[in-house]
Image (cartoon, rainbow, N blue to C red):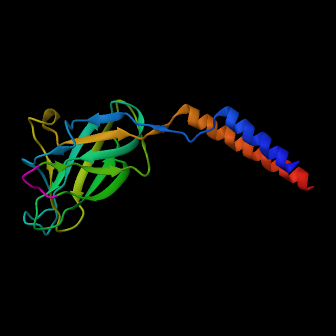
């Protein structure tokens, strides 16, 4: 009886085509990065209190969300000037200055050839609303931080420092349906087992 129940469940699962759900890429919430690599030319200083320029100095950029989406990741064109340390803190706040999420990252060293942007992944996935203003702030993570946030007025929109804000990937609708159906099938199978044992 138990074996027959298992066969019925397996047959039903196959008939429904239960598979692992795929995720679709999240949309772009804001973007003024033409590419994800660049050659440094100058930028806004992110300096710690013990660095050569005696900070601390931070830099902020505001943006208006182009779409409503849960935050997925942020890419910023922050680079390390050398000699001191490369660590910096990136903070996302809303229009009321409430902190939505904070990250600490290391900037790549400035070299003659193109370097990659820094990518930070969201863990909290705050919901960003279309038309609302948000602010990214890059700050020194230590007293010896010596970084710059690239600002190429001929490359980035309106002379802003370069960054991209992307929405989180979302499950395909079919994946959610399949997951729910699989859970119901598993529950039914468990009930049949209990009845057969009793």
20 in relation to 132, above or below: below
The answer to whether residue 64 is seen in the rendering is no
Q: x, y percentage for residue 159?
A: 12, 37
195 in relation to 163, above or below: below
| Residue reaching furthest to the right | 198
Residue 24 covered by magenta stretch: no
Judge left or right: residue 154 versus residue 22.
left
16 in relation to 97, above or below: above
Quarter of the figure with residue 25: top left
Judge left or right: residue 141 versus residue 169.
left
The answer to whether residue 73 is seen in the rendering is yes
Read off the magenta span. Answer: 109-113
Judge left or right: residue 111 versus residue 143.
left
Q: x, y percentage for residue 132?
A: 35, 34
Q: Residue at x 42, y 36 (%)?
A: 69
Q: Residue at x 15, y 36 (%)?
A: 156
Q: Nearer the viewer, residue 52 or 106?
A: 106
Q: Residue at x 40, y 34 (%)?
A: 129
Q: x, y percentage for residue 22?
A: 50, 38
Numbered circles on residues, count: 0
Q: Nearer the viewer, residue 141 or 78?
A: 78
Quarter of the figure with residue 166: top left
Q: x, y percentage for residue 97?
A: 33, 46
Residue 111 covered by magenta stretch: yes
Judge left or right: residue 28 versus residue 79.
right
Question: What main secondary structure does the magenta stretch of the protein show?
Answer: loop
Q: Quadrant of the C terminus?
A: bottom right
Q: Nearer the viewer, residue 103 or 132?
A: 103
């Amino acid at each position: 009886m138990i074996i027959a129940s298992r066969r019925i469940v397996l047959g039903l699962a196959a008939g429904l085509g239960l598979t692992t759900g795929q995720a679709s890429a999240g949309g772009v919430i804001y973007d003024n990065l033409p590419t994800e690599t660049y050659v440094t030319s100058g930028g806004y200083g992110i300096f710690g209190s013990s660095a050569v320029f005696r900070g601390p100095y931070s830099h902020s950029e505001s943006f208006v969300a182009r779409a409503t989406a849960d935050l997925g990741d942020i890419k910023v064109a922050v680079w390390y000037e050398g000699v001191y340390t490369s660590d910096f803190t990136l903070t996302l706040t809303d229009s009321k200055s409430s902190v939505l999420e904070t990250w600490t990252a290391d900037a790549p060293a400035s070299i003659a050839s193109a370097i990659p942007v820094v990518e930070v992944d969201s863990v909290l996935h705050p919901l960003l609303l279309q038309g609302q203003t948000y602010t990214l702030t890059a700050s020194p993570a230590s007293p010896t931080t010596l970084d710059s946030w690239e600002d190429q007025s001929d490359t980035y929109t309106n002379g802003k420092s370069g960054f991209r804000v992307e929405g989180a990937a979302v499950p395909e609708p079919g994946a959610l349906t399949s997951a729910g159906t699989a859970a119901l099938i598993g529950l039914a199978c468990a009930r049949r087992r209990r009845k057969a044992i009793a």
